[in-house]
């Protein structure tokens, strides 16, 4: 199987079977809502931080397959990570999506999120792919200040 087909499969799988979808009405979650007017993506992300570690992420919204699948991939990847590790992975993701070369170690950290590597060739879709990550980054920042 070609690498590109594998990546496409990851994206379609997360689009059709989104992980951690649906917001919760519970205490202790930082909620960030972001909108991407250029595509119409509309996304909310909830992050729960306990003792410096992300113990839960919830995501919900409407948008294109790139945006919605990316929210699912992001949630799956960052739950269980420390806040500092998650911030580093988010930065790695931005770097990759801008087409900047990343190291093997960064690739290992990004795991399924590597599926979005090809998005760097489609600048109009970069905002779709990064929306969930930006929401999570903002939630981490707000959670940290409390
Ligand atoms: Zn989009």
Image (tube, rainbow, N blue to C red):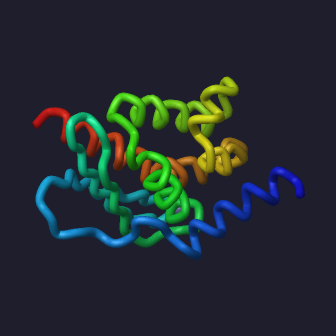
Name above or below for residue 71 compared with residue 82.
below
Residue ranking furthest to the right: 1
> Split into 4 quadrants, where in the image is the N terminus?
bottom right
Q: In the rendering, at what x and y percent does residue 82 appear?
A: 35, 35
Q: Which residue lies furthest to the bottom in this view?
A: 16
- Could you tell me residue 52's position as x and y percent? 25, 34
**Which residue lies at the image location 40% right of the left edge and 69% below the top edge?**
21
Say which quarter of the image contains residue 34.
bottom left
Residue 122, above or below 142? below
Q: Point out the image quarter for the C terminus.
A: top left
- From the viewer's perspective, is 105 left or right of 4? left
Q: Which residue is drawn at 88% across and 54% down?
A: 2
As drawn, 140 above or below 33: above
Residue shown at the point (42%, 60%) measured from the top left = 37
- Asked whether, in this view, residue 135 is left or right of residue 17, the answer is left
Residue lying at 53% horizontally and 36% vertically, measured from the top left: 94
Q: Is residue 118 above or below residue 25?
A: above
Describe residue 146's horizontal placement relative to residue 123 as left or right: left
Picture coordinates of residue 40 (x, y %)?
45, 66
Query: How far across and down, in percent of the image, does residue 23 sit?
Result: 28, 69
* Residue 54 image-quadrant placement: top left
């Amino acid at each position: 199987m070609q690498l590109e087909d594998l990546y496409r499969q990851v994206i379609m799988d997360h689009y059709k079977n989104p992980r951690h979808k649906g917001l919760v009405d519970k205490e202790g979650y930082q909620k960030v809502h972001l909108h991407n007017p250029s595509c119409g993506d509309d996304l909310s992300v909830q992050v729960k931080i306990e003792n410096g570690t992300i113990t839960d992420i919830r995501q919900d919204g409407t948008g294109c397959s790139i945006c919605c699948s990316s929210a699912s991939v992001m949630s799956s990847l960052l739950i269980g990570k420390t806040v500092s590790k998650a911030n580093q992975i988010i930065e790695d993701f931005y770097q990759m999506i801008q087409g900047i070369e990343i190291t093997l170690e960064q690739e290992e950290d990004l795991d399924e999120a590597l599926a979005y590597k090809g998005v760097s060739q489609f600048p109009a879709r970069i905002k779709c792919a990064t929306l969930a990550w930006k929401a999570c980054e903002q939630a981490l920042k707000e959670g940290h200040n409390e």
